[in-house]
Image (cartoon, rainbow, N blue to C red):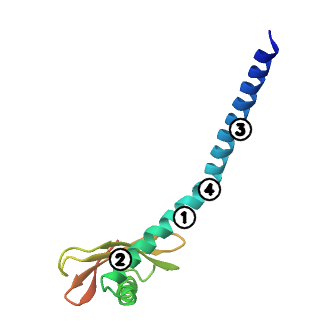
Amino acid sequence: MSTLVVILIIVAVVVAIVFIGGLIAARRRDRQQAGVWEQHVAEADAALEQARALDRGWHRETMEEVARSALREQRPDHSYEDLHLVLVDDQPGVDQDRAHFMAVGQDRMVRVVLAREGDRWVAQQVE
């Protein structure tokens, strides 16, 4: 074998090792950041839903109070730490608008669906 062939084989092996090492490192990074990525997506979705609600003139504080009131009345035994706005269903007009909140507790989650009746919000469903 000539010197040129040996050098080309060595260069090919080095390139292959670097390429495989890069694939392994990228896969490891993806596995480590998988939970972080899902968290960022969830936060972005929540921020988007809140922005849509605020942009449409919906008052989040009023909606949260209606949801909290419905939870006190229909699920007095459910204790929760956080109340998250998870879905804004903004239909044409006002009477078909819906908002979904999740009351997150240690042992379970409860969905509260609010419906708009004219200028006020009412609890349509507590699941």
Q: Nearer the viewer, residue 112 or 25?
A: 25
| Label 2 or label 4, whichever comes before in sequence order | 4
How far is the residue under mark 1 from the one under mark 2?
20 Å
Q: What is the three-letter code of the residue carrying label 4?
A: Gln
Q: Nearer the viewer, residue 113 or 108?
A: 113
Q: What is the three-letter code of the residue carrying label 3?
A: Gly
Q: Which residue is mark 4?
A: 33
Q: Which residue is mark 3?
A: 21
Q: Which residue is mark 2?
A: 52
Instruction: For the N terminus, give its image quadrant.
Output: top right
| Label 1 or label 3, whichever comes before in sequence order | 3
How far is the residue under mark 1 from the one under mark 4?
10 Å
- Label 3 or label 4, whichever lies nearer to me, is 3
| Label 3 or label 4, whichever comes before in sequence order | 3
| Label 2 or label 3, whichever comes before in sequence order | 3
Q: What is the three-letter code of the residue carrying label 1?
A: Gln
Residue at the far right: name it.
3
- Asked whether residue 54 is in view, the answer is yes
- Asked whether residue 80 is in view, the answer is no
How far is the residue under mark 2 from the one under mark 3?
44 Å
Tag 1 near tag 3, CB within 8 Å: no
Secondary element type, mark 4: helix
Marks counted in the figure total: 4
